[in-house]
Image: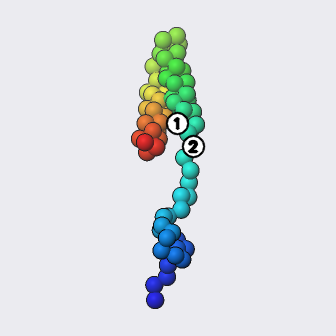
């Protein structure tokens, strides 16, 4: 005997799966702000301090946060 899914007792109700997670609309913008902060700190370390050793590591943060922001916007659309 098959069991009904999604507690549909009558035919009028549509069998729609529940949404488990709601998307936050503020999160991609926070990621963009953090990415811009890391980009700014990377620029300062290169221009003012001539600290070339830490620049590649800070660029990894910039790329990571921008990529996460881009993927957050693509899934929401």
SS for callout 1:
helix
Say which of marks 1 and 2 sits in front. 2
SS for callout 2:
loop
Q: Residues within 10 Å of mark 1 (few under 14, many from 20)?
A: some
Give x and y (percent) for residue 6. Answer: 52, 71
The residues tagged by marks 1 and 2 sit, at their Cα atoms, a distance apart of 8 Å
Q: Which residue position holds label 1?
A: 28
Give x and y (percent) for residue 7. Answer: 55, 74
**Which residue is pictured at 49% across the width and 17% down the height?**
43
Q: Among all residues in the image, which is located at the extreme front? A: 12
Mark yes or no: residue 48 visible.
Answer: yes
Residue in the foreground of this view, choosing between 45 and 13: 13
Q: Among all residues in the image, which is located at the extreme bottom? A: 1
Residue in the foreground of this view, choosing between 15 and 56: 15
Q: Which residue position holds label 2?
A: 24
Q: Residues within 10 Å of mark 2 (few under 14, many from 20)?
A: few
Give x and y (percent) for residue 55. Answer: 46, 23
Residue in the foreground of this view, choosing between 42 and 25: 25
**Which residue is pictured at 54% across the width and 21% down the height?**
41
Above-or-below relation of 51 to 25: above
Q: Quadrant of the C terminus?
A: top left
């Amino acid at each position: 005997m098959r069991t009904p899914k999604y507690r549909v007792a009558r035919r009028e109700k549509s069998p729609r799966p529940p949404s488990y997670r709601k998307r936050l609309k503020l999160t991609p913008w926070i990621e963009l702000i953090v990415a811009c902060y890391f980009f700014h700190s990377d620029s300062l370390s290169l221009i003012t301090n001539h600290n070339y050793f830490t620049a590649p590591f800070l660029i990894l943060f910039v790329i990571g946060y921008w990529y996460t922001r881009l993927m957050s916007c693509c899934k929401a659309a």
